[in-house]
Image: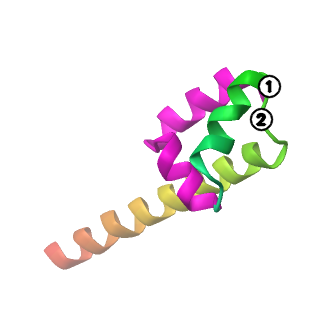
Amino acid sequence: MTYEQFSEQLKKTSLTKKEFALGTGLSQSSVTNWKAMKKVPSWVESWLKNYIEAKDGENLKKIIKESVCEE
């Protein structure tokens, strides 16, 4: 994954680089340094995929709960 792809994925998750760093236990400067390397560590892609899936699951649960409460 390139740094540009990483930045695009962050936009899809609505995470900032600072929030991503906090969520992964990294320093914000480590995440920023990936730009100079023009690539990111291999684990980042799967982390973002899992984050998106979890977020989607939480949104679905919220919709279902709201739907059930309205009935």
Label 2, residues with CA under 10 Å away: few <14, some 14-19, many ≥20 = many
- Of all residues, the one furthest to the right in this rendering is 42
- Of all residues, the one furthest to the front in this rendering is 29
Q: Quarter of the image holding residue 37?
A: top right
Front-most of residues 6 and 58? 6
Front-most of residues 69 and 12? 12
Image marks 1 and 2: residues in contact by CB distance under 8 Å:
yes
In this rendering, the label closer to the viewer, 1 or 2: 1
In the displayed structure image, the side of residue 71 where residue 45 appears, left or right: right
Q: Which residues are drawn in magenta?
A: 1-24
Q: Secondary structure at mark 2?
A: loop
What x and y, as percent, mark residue 26? 65, 55
Q: Circle 2 sits on which residue? A: 40
What x and y, as percent, mark residue 8? 57, 27
The chief SS type of the magenta part is helix
Amino acid identity at mark 1 = Met
Q: Secondary structure at mark 1?
A: helix
Asked whether residue 38 is in view, the answer is: yes
| Magenta stretch contains residue 64 | no
In the displayed structure image, the side of residue 51 where residue 15 appears, left or right: left
- The C terminus appears in which quarter of the rendering? bottom left
What x and y, as percent, mark residue 43? 81, 49
In the displayed structure image, the side of residue 36 where residue 41 appears, left or right: right
- Of all residues, the one furthest to the left in this rendering is 70
Please tell me which residue is depicted at 33% across the width and 67% down the height of the picture.
Answer: 62
What x and y, as percent, mark residue 64? 34, 69
Q: Circle 1 sits on which residue? A: 37
